[in-house]
Image (cartoon, rainbow, N blue to C red):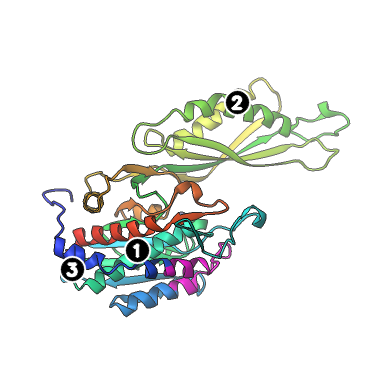
Amino acid sequence: MNSKWRPELDRGQVDLVLDNIDEGEVIGFLCDLIHLESVNPPGDVAVGVELCRRLLDQVGFDTQIVGPSAEHCSLIATLAGHSGSPRLLFNSHLDVVPIGELASWHFPPFGAERHDGRIYGRGAADDKASVVAQVMAGIALARSGVSLTGSLIITEVADEETGGDLGSGFLVDNELVQADYVIIGEPTNGVLCIGERGRVVVELTVIGSTGHAAAPLTGVNAIEVMGLVISALTMDLWPQITSRQHSVLPASTATISFVTGGIKINVIPDRCTIQIDRRIVEMESVDSTVAEIRETAERAIKGIRGVAIQTKKLIGRSSRLIHPESRVVEAAQHASRWLGHEPLLGGFFAGSDAKHFARRNYSTLIVGPGDPDTAHTSDEWVAVEDVLNATRLYALTALTMLN
Ligand SMILES: [Zn+2]
């Protein structure tokens, strides 16, 4: 996979491809997609998928729309090369998260207004800039007339913001796409992310016993005991966790993001439950992550009679890293340098659809335009120049790999 292959580009071919990237067309298409309000839930992306399909169909891609429903659909567009090998797959998502409080936006969330070289709107960075850059890169390659050996498969999908089972997961589970290499478009500020942390979600319940609130000692108050457990987790365990880092991935993190408990104001609560979101690095396993939470909680309640702890793993996924000498990474680095940027390798800060392709062991790189800090916030934006740079990067990476 990373044997004697050396990335190469031909100046004449590069010029042919780059000449077919037009700022007006790229940014016009980005604004069209932002206007669509493809908020998830409910996550209807049908119009956006059809817009991408039509553009790629016009330049010679073989296109099909698939999915579990008309709303939760995804595009598969293929530009087949002479030998069909290798197969490079582009993937980004067309759904966006809700806007939150409208009052906290200074620009209309779906207005796609342009100010100071930036386009503002929900999905500008996450993830419509990547969708646009991938589609426009495909169009530039097709229009250039450069003959390709390998195949380019462009998938623009539904449902990433709720886990991707109806989008990328659907494509992978039903074997609708096969690839050798995958490039996931997400806002990474152009950093070549060769992996992402794993994710473990743990539900922890303190079980006490009910009693009359007027006589608190007749029961064991699960909410008050949970207070001790939360203190132990946040004061003792979290500081150890956040010091764990040893490669390009962001450090390990932990946070309690859900709490439930209580029956009635005059009843001692017998149950209190929290959910813990852990992002884990290479040195941590799913099992050890659950175990250390449980052990910390058990230490915190030691000596308290009539209390039990239950833990349940709701999500358990290890971290994922591809080899930095994978052909897709070397091609993207080569394309970056050709465009005058020194490539940075890193790890993606959040989760992405890469997890679905990782199940098939496709060598998967995450890179795209936009600042990750602007994703899911009000006044989300992406710089026009970054969208154009990403379009060029995707196009030249594909040219390097498929030619
Ligand atoms: Zn995203």
Does the residue at mark 2 contact the one at mark 1 (Cβ under 8 Å)?
no
Whether residue 12 appears in this view of the structure is: yes
Q: Is residue 266 left or right of residue 119?
A: right
Name which quarter of the figure residue 42 lies in. bottom right
Between 346 and 109, the one lying in front of the other is 109
- Amino acid found under the numbered disc labelled 2: Ala
Name which quarter of the figure residue 307 lies in. top right
- Amino acid found under the numbered disc labelled 3: Leu
Q: Residues within 10 Å of mark 1 (few under 14, many from 20)?
A: many
Residue drawn where x is 39% and y is 71% of the image:
75
Mark 3 against mark 2, which lies toward the viewer? 3
Q: Which residue is tagged 1? A: 134
Vertical relation: 23 (above or below) 192: below
N-terminal label among 2 and 1? 1
Residue drawn where x is 86% and y is 38% of the image:
266
Region of the chain picked out in magenta, as a range: 28-49
N-terminal label among 3 and 2? 3
Q: Which residue is tagged 2? A: 232
Q: Is residue 131 left or right of residue 229?
A: left
Q: Secondary structure at mark 1?
A: helix
- What percent of the width, then of the height, locates residue 14? 19, 62
Mark 2 against mark 1, which lies toward the viewer? 1
- Amino acid found under the numbered disc labelled 1: Gln
Q: Which residue is tagged 3? A: 148
